[in-house]
Image (spheres, rainbow, N blue to C red):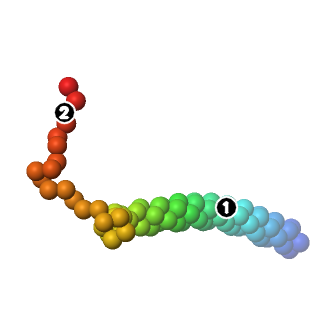
């Protein structure tokens, strides 16, 4: 049998080993969680950029009607009659 002092030493060594392993495990999990957080932040930034691009694209779609309206109001332009349209071919 082990002496009481030796048993206490073995117990303390086991507790120190378990504590060290739990620190390593926790650090490992924290690094993975941090990496995942960074990836999600990058994805959020990319989605934000894409959202901005879609808003710009949406605003340009609305410009066509405004351009036509300004051409009619300010420049008195109109769509020509079909009989006045001449088709030109490039052969």
- Percent across and percent down for residue 18 are 73, 67
- Percent across and percent down for residue 39 are 57, 60
Residue drawn at x 65%, y 64% as measured from the top left: 34
In the rendering, which numbered label is found on residue 31?
1
- Callout 1: 10 Å neighbours few (<14), some, many (20+)? few
Residue 28 occupies quadrant: bottom right
- Percent across and percent down for residue 27 are 71, 64
User: Relative to 76, is 11 on the left or the right?
Assistant: right
Q: Do the residues labelled 1 and 2 touch (CB within 8 Å)?
A: no
Q: Which one is earlier in the sequence, the residue at label 1 or at label 2? A: 1
Q: Nearer the viewer, residue 22 or 67?
A: 67
Q: Nearer the viewer, residue 4 or 42?
A: 42
Residue drawn at x 19%, y 56% as measured from the top left: 80
User: Relative to 31, is 61 on the left or the right?
Assistant: left
- Percent across and percent down for residue 31 are 67, 61
* 1 or 2: mark nearer the eye: 2
* Quadrant that contains the N terminus: bottom right
In the rendering, which numbered label is found on residue 10?
none
Residue 1 is at least partly visible in this image = no
Q: What element carries label 2?
A: loop
Residue drawn at x 19%, y 36% as measured from the top left: 88
Find disc 2 in the rendering and name its residue.
89
């Amino acid at each position: 049998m082990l002496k009481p002092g030796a048993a206490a030493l073995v117990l303390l060594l086991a507790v120190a080993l378990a504590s060290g392993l739990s620190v390593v495990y926790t650090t490992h999990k924290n690094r993975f969680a941090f990496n995942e957080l960074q990836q999600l932040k990058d994805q959020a930034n990319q989605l934000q950029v894409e959202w901005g691009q879609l808003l710009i694209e949406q605003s340009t779609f609305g410009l066509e009607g405004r351009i036509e309206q300004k051409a009619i109001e300010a420049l008195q332009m109109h769509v020509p009659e079909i009989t006045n349209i001449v088709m030109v071919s490039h052969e």
